[in-house]
Image: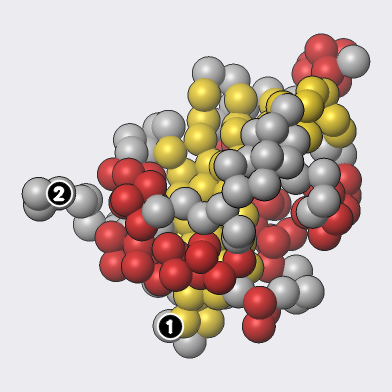
Amino acid sequence: MQRSVAKNVYARTDGIPVRMDLSDVVDVATLEREVFTDPWSADSFLAEVERKPEIGYPVVIRDDGRLIAYAVAWFIVDELHVGNIAVHPDFQGRGLATLLLEHLMDEGRRRDMVFATLEVRPSNAPALALYGKFGFRQIARRRNYYRDNREDALVLATALHPSAEARLG
């Protein structure tokens, strides 16, 4: 079945997050399999490219044309939900995940989101350290969340607006 995909209206600038488009899907799915033990499918990323831009926000970073990082987020009512952040192993430790998370949170604030939330494995120490730098804290635990090993997920949240701090407790 042929799917129609809107043309990417963002400039393809190296090192800067730009909206993911159809031409990115294969590279993103390949990197996803390289980085995660329970990867999303290429169809999942295709669905993100096709999702309405007021809800879905998939972005990529390229370096000299090579896909080196990506993120997927959703805007749901007053919440930015971070679905996925990945950086190519050759480029980890260079601040790209920080750049992506900053970009997502800035976009959330621009869209008047109040909270940012996400799920993360308790065993993912680098991700937990990153999220901690942005003020994320645990608000819940989802038991047996990950399909590959039944590991729990920690649900983390942070305020994007000062009025949300009291609501996070």
Which residue position is annotated with label 1? 65
Q: Residues within 10 Å of mark 2 (few under 14, many from 20)?
A: few
Camera-nearest residue between 65 and 140: 140
- x 20%, y 51%: residue: 5
Q: Residue furthest left?
A: 1
Image location of residue 32, percent across then percent down: 52, 63
Q: Position of residue 148 (x, y in %)?
A: 60, 48
Query: In this view, which residue lies farthest toward the top?
Result: 167
Identify the residue at horizontal 68%, vertical 51% (top origin): 101
Q: Which of the two residues, 92 or 65, is positioned nearer the viewer here?
A: 92
Tell me which label, 2 or 1, sits earlier in the chain: 2
Residue type, mark 2 in image: Arg
**Front-most of residues 63 and 31:** 31
The answer to the question of whether label 2 and label 1 lie on touching residues, with beta carbons closer than 8 A, is no
Residue lying at the far front in this picture: please name it.
149
Residue at left offset 75%, top offset 69%: 95
Which amino acid type corresponds to the residue marked 1 in the rendered image? Gly
| Circle on res. 17 | none
The Cα–Cα distance between marks 2 and 1, rounded to whole angstroms, is 25 Å
Q: Position of residue 35 (x, y in %)?
A: 61, 66
Q: Is residue 84 above or below residue 140?
A: below
Residue 135 found in image quarter: top right
- In the image, is residue 132 above or below residue 93? above
Secondary structure of the residue carrying numbered label 1: loop
Would residue 23 appear left or right of 116 to someone viewing this image?
left
- Tell me which residue sits at (43%, 38%) in the image: 56
**157 in relation to 97, above or below:** above
**Label 2: which residue?**
3
Counting from the top left corner in percent of width and height, residue 92 is at 72, 74
Where is the C terminus found, in terms of image quarters?
top right
